Image (spheres, rainbow, N blue to C red):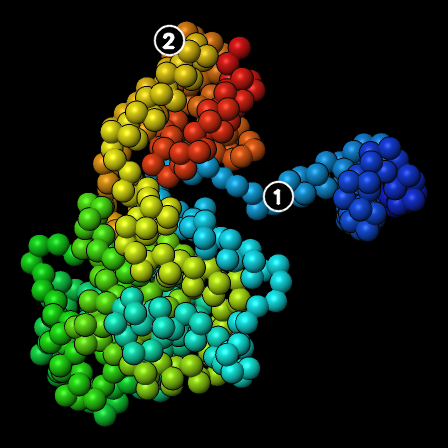
Amino acid sequence: MAKKSASAKNDALRSLPSVTVLLDSEPLRKAAEEFGQPAVTSATREAVDNLRLVVHQGQGGTKMPSPKELAEQIATQLSAQEANTIQPVINATGILLHTGLGRAPMAQEAAEAAGQAARGYCNVELNLMTGQRWQRSKIVEHLLCELTGAEAAHVVNNNAGATGLILATLAMGREVIVSHGELIEIGGGFRVPDVITAYGATLRPVGTTNRTRVDDYAAAISEQTGAMLVVHPSNFRVEGFTESPDLGELADLAKEHQVPLVHDIGSGALIDFKQFGCADEPIASESIQAGADLVFFSGDKLLGGPQCGIIVGRRDLVEQVMKHPLSRALRVDKITLAALLATLKIYRDPEKARQSIPLLRFLSLPLDKLKKRTERLAKQLQAKLKDWEIKTNEDETFVGGGTLPQQGVLSWSLTIGLSGKGLSEKGSAESRVKKLAERLRMGKPAVVGRIQSDQLILSLHGVFEEQDEQLEQAILAAVTGDCAR
Ligand SMILES: *Cc1c(COP(=O)(O)O)cnc(C)c1O
């Protein structure tokens, strides 16, 4: 028996297609033209090695693919890899800051500035007036100070980085006082207690989940205190019997004891979002005004700029933070700085900000206009797709991205479900709607919506008006693929 299986294995190994033969095959010669010889050679070697391993480990019965079959498999795999690129997506999810879709789309001006910085050289760390080197945050510092009322500013990779850098600078080996109600998780591994520990500080929680008073902070201050941290609970709310101290009162307490008060406002609103019908979001300038020593936030949430973490506040503390060794590890690149600078310039004129920054433009969209666009699209699609029932429905849009929880903004959506005629055809409604969503996702441009009770819901709230035509074509292409006949 053992002898028989060993010889079967040897036979199998002998019949293993050779790399040279495979590379000379039609599918792989074509693949080499498209993807380059090195990629094809390495994929082919790997495929043959894998097959050899399977034979070695197997009991001899391995079915050997023909060289033609194997070559085709390799070519298919290479095409699949190549298709896996970052590509434009039409965001029809109704979530405006979708982390999976890259959070905030940038303003045209910001995208152009980023492109220009990327293509050539730029004065990211050179003061062109004096010819001297400078700290790269200097380029955006004056604007950040102008827009927030702070003395100084620094920019790092993201807000999680800003939080870590501040904790490491002010509280490593010391205590950080935080309200129990703010020991939250933002998502994606950002848990306030863990972040504090990770940067070598000790958490000193005060108060209770729903109520924390200034006295609770006062009682916790000691020689060991490195900082008092206030965190905006972003995607979480405690309602009912609640109390939290006024930031100004906390600032007075912090000053009295010479302890830095640092405020993680999270989403980084530079303007009041109540004008868009959104709930109370902390505004950077208000936090500085109230007396926080350092205020920090994301660049790609409500601010609508590139991914970065912005730190503003007292000059001495900002400088201390900049000098910390971690600062270098969190340094932003020239592309981010160029995009941020262009975004901040837009904020000098709030009306321009509402028009140019996509997130703000989406939020300012008049409801009746959105309704008209949605109805127009529904009518056009319905005329062409008889198997499907296309309706418009009142809906809610969420800002998302860890901001403004449950805070829906009134909106309109397109609902695509099977009509009576479509329902009688083969395939359950569930699987056909799922298939449609998949085809839209894999189209070019990709379209992402959401499925709810066997219907595909597409929201135009986060769709740029100039994409309406593309969206219509994408839906028609996805349906006519195999869903309708
Ligand atoms: C989103 C958020 C963070 C993390 O910011 P990133 O820019 O995603 O790193 C930290 N703190 C709060 C309160 C947040 O809302």
- Numbered circle sitting on residue 414: none
Q: Name the amino acid type tagged 1.
A: Asn
Q: Which residue is mark 2?
A: 420
* Secondary structure under the numbered disc 2 in the rendered image: helix
Q: Which residue is mark 1?
A: 84
Please name whichever residue, 139 or 281, is drawn nearer the observer in this view of the structure. 139
Q: Quadrant of ligand 1?
A: bottom left
Taking the image as shown, residue 160 lies to the left or right of residue 131, namely left
Q: Dot 1: few (<14), some (14–19), or many (≥20) neighbours within 10 Å? A: few
Which of pointers 1 and 2 lies earlier in the amino acid sequence?
1
User: How many numbered dots are placed on residues in this image?
Assistant: 2
Q: Describe the element under mark 1 as helix, strand or loop.
A: loop
* Residue at 11% over, 76% down: 249
Q: Is residue 281 above or below residue 100?
A: below
Q: Nearer the viewer, mark 1 or mark 2?
A: 1
Q: Answer above or below: position of 81 versus 374.
A: below
- Residue 412 shows in the view: no
Q: Nearer the viewer, residue 440 or 219?
A: 440
* Residue under the point 44% across and 84% down: 324
Tell me which corner region of the image, top left, top right, bottom left or bottom right, holds residue 309.
Answer: bottom left
Residue type highlighted by circle 2: Gly
Residue 406, given in percent of the width and then of the height, sits at 23, 46
